[in-house]
Amino acid sequence: MRGLLLLLWLWSAATVMAGAWEPHARIRDVAVAAVGGRVPPEDVLVDPALRVVPCVRPLAAAVAGPRSVEVRCPDSPGWRVFVPLRLREESSVVVLARSVRAGTPLRAEDLAVQARDVAAVAGTPFAEPAPLVGRVPRRGLPAGAVLTEQALANEILLRRGDPVVLVSRLGGIEVRAEGRAMGNATAGGTVSVENLASRRIVRGRATAKGEVDVLY
């Protein structure tokens, strides 16, 4: 037994010195078999820099989680590596029919529904376009981009220069005054407003079209 182990060790050392390594294709094949062929070989992501000595005995593999497979060489000494999987999950989601600029409210004609791999989408995509009309991209987006909650701000309720009603509530008393927005604001966002009567600049929260609650 000791003689066999010595031979295996010498063989492994010789292969390393000769520059021979376990073929990535072999590792990939056993990983594909471990998931029952449900993941194509191109989605089994063997690290190109991986270097392990060739395994004399057949490789073993087992699913290690929803996105990885453990591949093991049962030689003594052996090795094991965890190979990540790129999972695909196709679903119908809302995408941009044309490129849009940051801060430009979305229109119905800007939106389309297409089948996409949502497993590769960073964020929460949408299934229906109607609720997105009026929402605002936080940054410029190209045609075909999948729209996500994280990429959009709420509809712009106020724009710089818009007339507004300032609503001040204190001790059960409500006072209203005319004002002018000094910047843009989405629903629930804060904005500076000039009180047209006093010419004072106050901060408030946009609560509805043309209405701002004064913040104290």
Image: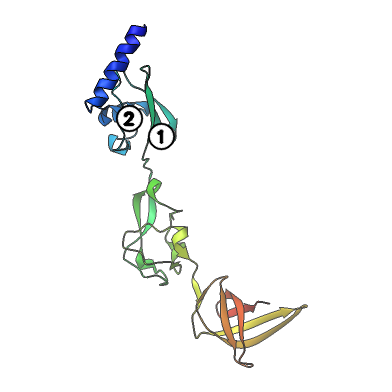
Closer mark to the observer between disc 1 and disc 2: 1
State the residue in front, 118 or 130.
118
Amino acid type indicated by mark 2:
Val
Query: For the view shown, which residue lies furthest in the right direction?
Result: 171
Above or below for 74 versus 67:
above
State the residue in front, 6 or 144.
6
**Pointers 1 and 2 in contact (CB under 8 A)?**
no
Q: Which residue sits at x=33%, y=12%? A: 6
For the N terminus, the image quarter is top left
- Between the C-alphas of marks 1 and 2, the distance is 11 Å
Total labels: the figure holds 2
Q: Position of residue 63 (x, y in %)?
A: 42, 29
Above or below for 194 versus 69:
below
Above or below for 90 versus 11:
below
Instruction: Report whether 207 appears left or right of 134.
Output: right
Q: Quadrant of residue 82?
A: top left
Q: Quadrant of residue 179?
A: bottom right
The secondary structure type at the circle numbered 1 is strand
Q: Position of residue 208 (x, y in %)?
A: 57, 75
Above or below for 90 versus 169:
above
User: Is residue 71 among what the camera can see?
Assistant: no
The residue indicated by pointer 2 is: 32
Q: Position of residue 34 (x, y in %)?
A: 37, 26
Q: Which residue sits at x=37%, y=16%? A: 76
Mark number displayed over residue 68: 1
User: Earlier along the polypeptide chain: callout 1 or callout 2?
Assistant: 2
